[in-house]
Image (cartoon, helix red, strand yellow):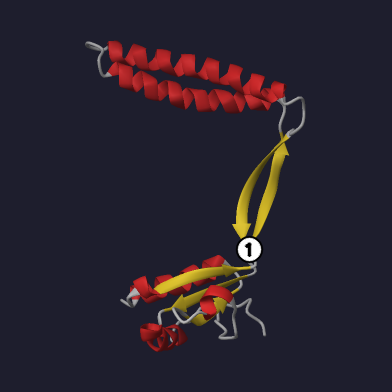
Amino acid sequence: MDTSSDQPFTGTTSGAAASSEYRVIASYRDYAQAQRAVDFMSDSEFPVENLRILGHDVTTVEAVIGRLTKGRAALTGASSGAWWGLLIGLLLGMFAVGTAWFGVMVAGLLIGTVWGAIFGFVEHWATGGRRDFTSMSTLAAERYDVVCTPAFAEQAAQLLATMRG
């Protein structure tokens, strides 16, 4: 059974979706399709509080973005420190008289940038090269079921049958 298209399939399922609380009304290969189905139902004024999106066979995916050097760690730390410094500068600048608030804000930005770069460099140096890459972790599921409470399941299935594309 091919579920790679936007068209839902109504097959058997296991776990929470098969419980007496919810009925599977559609299954999709990716989350965006399931989200699109629920959004369509919301736009059609269906009571979406009766719906859930369940992911099955969930795995963690870590995408390696690039190599992490001491310089890149310092640059990343500098950008984080700049934001913190700007925030502190804005907070302290509220108590400054006249145009001095601008100087306080710039000083906070610069101090935060310098200290952020130092901490970023030292933090990476202290690991001794055990993790010399940057990555981003996400969760992915094999299948996403849109489930509904029994009272609205038939209405939901009929509404989804009218959805195209």
Q: Using the image as rendered, state which of residue 67 and residue 140 is in the foreground.
A: 140
Q: Secondary structure at mark 1?
A: loop
Residue located 51% across and 71% down the image: 34
Q: Is residue 93 above or below residue 35?
A: above
Which quarter of the figure has residue 44?
bottom left
Q: Is residue 61 above or below residue 46?
A: above
Residue located 33% across and 22% down the image: 90
- On screen, residue 42 versus residue 23, left or right, reads left
The N terminus lies in quadrant: bottom right
Residue located 56% across and 78% down the image: 27
Which quarter of the figure has residue 154?
bottom left
- On screen, residue 151 versus residue 75, left or right, reads left
- On screen, residue 76 versus residue 96, left or right, reads right
The number of numbered discs placed on residues in the rendered structure image is 1
Place of residue 66 in the rendered image (x, y in percent of width and height, measured from the top left) = 71, 39
Q: Using the image as rendered, state which of residue 147 and residue 62 is in the foreground.
A: 147
For badge 1, the amino acid type reads: Val
- Would you call the spot at circle 1 few (<14 residues within 10 Å), some (14-19), or many (20 or more)? few
- On screen, residue 150 versus residue 30, left or right, reads left
Place of residue 88 in the rendered image (x, y in percent of width and height, measured from the top left) = 38, 21
Q: Using the image as rendered, state which of residue 20 and residue 89 is in the foreground.
A: 20
Q: Residue furthest front?
A: 20
Name the residue carrying label 1.
58
Place of residue 146 in the rendered image (x, y in percent of width and height, measured from the top left) = 49, 75
Place of residue 165 in the rendered image (x, y in percent of width and height, measured from the top left) = 51, 78
Which quarter of the figure has residue 77?
top right
Q: Residue furthest left?
A: 98
